[in-house]
Amino acid sequence: MAKIKNNSPVLFFYNNSKKWLAKISKNESFHTHIGILKHSDAIGKEYGSKLITNKDKYVYLLEPTMYDYVMRIQHGTQIVYPKDIGYIIARSGIGSGQKILEIGTGSGSLTSFVASVVKPRGHVYTFDVDEKFMKIAEKNIKKAGVSKYVTQHNLDLKTAKKMPLENMDVALIDLGDPWVVIPQVRQMLKGSGSIFAICPTMNQLEKLTMALVENEFTDIESTEHIIRNIEAREGKTRHSFQGIGHTTYLCFARKAFFGRETRKSTESAKTTKKTPSKTVKKPSAKTTKKTPSKTVKKPSAKTTKKSSKKSS
Amino acid sequence: MAKIKNNSPVLFFYNNSKKWLAKISKNESFHTHIGILKHSDAIGKEYGSKLITNKDKYVYLLEPTMYDYVMRIQHGTQIVYPKDIGYIIARSGIGSGQKILEIGTGSGSLTSFVASVVKPRGHVYTFDVDEKFMKIAEKNIKKAGVSKYVTQHNLDLKTAKKMPLENMDVALIDLGDPWVVIPQVRQMLKGSGSIFAICPTMNQLEKLTMALVENEFTDIESTEHIIRNIEAREGKTRHSFQGIGHTTYLCFARKAFFGRETRKSTESAKTTKKTPSKTVKKPSAKTTKKTPSKTVKKPSAKTTKKSSKKSS
Amino acid sequence: MAKIKNNSPVLFFYNNSKKWLAKISKNESFHTHIGILKHSDAIGKEYGSKLITNKDKYVYLLEPTMYDYVMRIQHGTQIVYPKDIGYIIARSGIGSGQKILEIGTGSGSLTSFVASVVKPRGHVYTFDVDEKFMKIAEKNIKKAGVSKYVTQHNLDLKTAKKMPLENMDVALIDLGDPWVVIPQVRQMLKGSGSIFAICPTMNQLEKLTMALVENEFTDIESTEHIIRNIEAREGKTRHSFQGIGHTTYLCFARKAFFGRETRKSTESAKTTKKTPSKTVKKPSAKTTKKTPSKTVKKPSAKTTKKSSKKSS
Amino acid sequence: MAKIKNNSPVLFFYNNSKKWLAKISKNESFHTHIGILKHSDAIGKEYGSKLITNKDKYVYLLEPTMYDYVMRIQHGTQIVYPKDIGYIIARSGIGSGQKILEIGTGSGSLTSFVASVVKPRGHVYTFDVDEKFMKIAEKNIKKAGVSKYVTQHNLDLKTAKKMPLENMDVALIDLGDPWVVIPQVRQMLKGSGSIFAICPTMNQLEKLTMALVENEFTDIESTEHIIRNIEAREGKTRHSFQGIGHTTYLCFARKAFFGRETRKSTESAKTTKKTPSKTVKKPSAKTTKKTPSKTVKKPSAKTTKKSSKKSS
């Protein structure tokens, strides 16, 4: 049974919209509309216990979960919401031990949650270019207790000459223009590795999808996730009158090799080299040149070359 | 770069509705409507590569993720869908290292996914009473490669005299009548630990919510999760004409102690000390009486007695 | 071209959340946060024109539609929202010329809208028992300009001895316990006439559905209607961050005669009388007695008798 | 009590997915998987009665509503679904007596429903250019019994020199490129009249919205409408496992005059009188030509000036 001590993290929970996240500090206290919450009163209690304020209201002393950290994060920038984080994890199969690339650290909400899943042997490598946000994220990641499993990089991958990582299991992108980094992300992903991009607008989904096709990704899927609260009460169960609005759409895909063919089961390896299958999309370099998609930034020539080299 | 070898797991991916999950076995082959998929042709390729069939169609050779295992599971019973698994993980903050209690193993889909998150130091303890389903689940868990992190129990917790576990971080319930095991689950959960129940009907949500209040849970939240596919295509982006139907509602809550109060900030520390914390886990009859929840129908005398008996 | 005159109705439209509905009265003016709106300034303008306030803001002078009346109604009670009104009309096929029964006038929002559709030869007969609400509704119906097509009755149909109407095309019910009036409604509906009930909770849907089955209704359908706003803007199109919450569920059905059989095509009329088809539910009176649904108020014996008489 | 006669329309209702709409013709019969439905057996019955087939199954003989006509329409082209028709009527306040312009008759589903609402004094003027579809629509409109209230025009409004109508209450557009006819629609609409466009893609919403702003429409609103079936059953109520997919988005707006200002309340009435309202309805052919806005963007100074010129 875990007792609350000085320095223990506690979520003072009044209700879902009134809650306070803090590290217990024996001389501190919060002044809230429901009265004073004295930290020292929490010390020695078991998580789940009540703490009564001087106004005779009470809160529960909950052990914060990663959900609580994400929802209470300092909003220097937008957070990724649990409903979306959940699907990202479930769809790309993020699990303990994986190496995750993240482009656009933002407030560190997704970073922290994912780190709590991949630890202790996995790691999150996260990139941003805004010093101010990076500091906010650093704080948030530290509060969430996962700093050890996160490395923050200040590097613009769009212009970087050499990719600093390789063989990543999953790449998460939270940029306004996610399509510009797809060639770079591709280089850092392992074969059949997953990509997930946070796309608040339909236009982003559209542009990104085109870039993903052009960069040889498969299993491309765009989704949106709606969570609806239900008020379950005896004889009066119904959905909540409060609606929950749009947060973001999500775009998923997996790295494939369009031009890297293994031959038909019935043919010899020799034949393979000679007869390019008509029904199969042509090796990448060519295709890329032929499809000058206007709205999608061109995958750098380099990337293309690299792919062709690999497949030769 | 990981190459596919004999015994490597591979998802032969044609499209999202045509895909085959297998362990490579060099003499095997699948006969499908798109032709023959010869396992030996996959050996030596990198994940993400193409494999061409004798009908000149092709699949991608993907490295299966936990999502693929869940979606391809042998449906001896219903699976829990990724959209719901994701929210369960995100809302209850399931992360690496946690101890998870699961009541109702079902097909093992939720079991497997959660195990892949809590491993290597965490563990899933899962209970069922149907031998047949337990065997199906065992197979599925093994296929997903997480047997080491899962213990399957054949025990009816509803009638069990002594609870076999304690201090669980999160409890997952997938039963037709989840409310009957709430007192037992409570005993096994740590203070402020989370509970999640799979409730396909509104009536289940309603009954369960009443049982949760009665058993001193807080932060009770019922939700439903809607995933909508979006077809993102140049100049023609819209939601999919194919709708995705209901799977289940979810009910979340956290274990609290309604009767265990720490005193008002203005009162002496002494009083606080008087409340012995050993009795903690017992939702004693007394407590129940003290919380005459107006909106909740009185728990029948029987149930209450049953609870007190068990805890005495 | 319609010019605004003294006494013309005008919607002063600033935006979707700031708008004022009024009848032009040449000496009047509104004081709003965007400045003074002087009625006399509107006189002589065409609908659609701008009116500038003394704060240099402007509103458009729109000709109010039934939507505007419904949305601006004096909320003495809840209104039925346009998204739900729309489906009620579309699903039950309400059109010009129909006779509509409404039980529970409420604020008169649904009453007014439906009257504007069925006029000039159709009519809405609406029942309520709350004098206060009836007066509010009367005002709202008058404002909406459809008083001529609405008759308000102060009568409790639950206890009424004789039904005041017959052969109604559609019945609309907005009561907390819609199931109690189903036998009465049935008497007033024409054969295969439609019923629609406003049911804010799932429990109401459930009880009502049972009552509908018991009272020989078919094509029973429960639905909910979600409207989502989309912010369509160049290059940044997405759903609105503002969610729209639950309003109500809707339950639809059509009056049938379970026991009134026309015989199999191949048999003679004689045989019909002799051999009651096993696969067909037994004539109503009996069935009703046999199915003492606990949660559903018993359809009065009278109703039952009447039905059987008709079928003999 | 209406009895079914020869030539009466009947919906033979087995369940929501098996139903047949026909005009009774005494010598006809349907051969269905539930047996033979002999028309003559229906004659003399009341609507709502049962008809038993030679396979001992039964259907109900329902009086078809406009919903039934819409859902059973001959799908030469896509129909507009009741959920969307309902909102179109509710949001634009379509009622008895109105004059409706429709561009893109399609299968005549929306046409027929709207005609059934605006009749007997209102009318629907519908335009199409595809002879084949026009004939299908003609049939469908006739079947629905509203031919008298509908005029079908074979005219391409995009290129028409003179608009054939004026002072329409509401305009409905169901074209792939609705933005191209906005100037024409504007000419035919009354001041503050409503427009509704069927837009299956987000890209259409985006382009149309820009065209609406440019053409001086206000109260612009894009929405989508989701209908979810609920299976209400004793103790097991839940949403349907069958999802309902995307049909279309809808775009609504009302005609305003951006440049036609009535003066600030504090200015003299004289100025106001100077604005002759005769020129009103003409955004003139010129405007149309000048607005070859592909991407629209500019509500621009020019447009504004032009409008003011016109009104001076």
Image (cartoon, coloured by chain):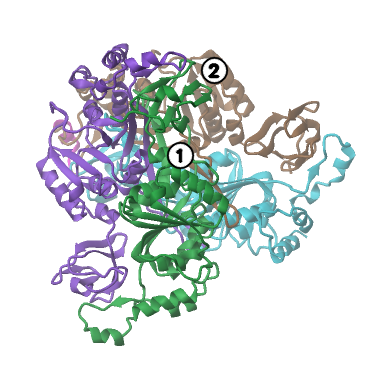
Chain colours: A brown, B cyan, C green, D purple
Query: Circle 2 — which element?
Result: helix
Q: Is residue D260 left or right of residue C184?
A: left
Tag 2: residue type? Phe
Q: Is residue B308 left or right of residue D69?
A: right
Task: Say which quarter of the image contains residue D219.
Answer: top left
**Residue under label 1:** C71
Circle 1 marks a residue in which chain? C
Q: Which mark is residue A133?
A: 2
Q: Closest to the observer: B150 or D216?
A: D216
> Is B63 in the magenta?
no
Counting from the top left corner in percent of width and height, residue A30 is at 74, 28
Do the residues marked 1 and 2 share a common chain? no
Give the foreground label among 1 and 2. 1
Does residue D302 appear in this view?
yes
Neighbours of disc 2 within 10 Å: few (<14), some (14-19), many (20+)? some
Position of the C terminus of chain A by quadrant:
top left
User: Looking at the image, which residue is at 20% across and 21% down?
Assistant: D284
Counting from the top left corner in percent of width and height, residue C21 is at 45, 33
User: Looking at the image, which residue is at 29% across and 16% down?
Assistant: D311
Tag 1: residue type? Met
Does residue B152 appear in this view?
no
From the viewer's perspective, is residue D63 above or below residue C51?
A: below
Neighbours of disc 1 within 10 Å: few (<14), some (14-19), many (20+)? some
Task: Say which quarter of the image contains residue B184.
Answer: bottom right
Counting from the top left corner in percent of width and height, residue A212 is at 32, 28
Q: Which mark is residue A71?
A: none
Q: CA distance from mark 1 to mark 2?
A: 43 Å
Task: Say which quarter of the image contains residue A3.
Answer: top right
Tell me the magenta residue range.
A267-274
From the viewer's perspective, is residue B301 above or below residue C269?
A: above
Q: Is residue B257 left or right of residue C141?
A: right
User: Looking at the image, which residue is at 47% across and 76% down?
Assistant: C302
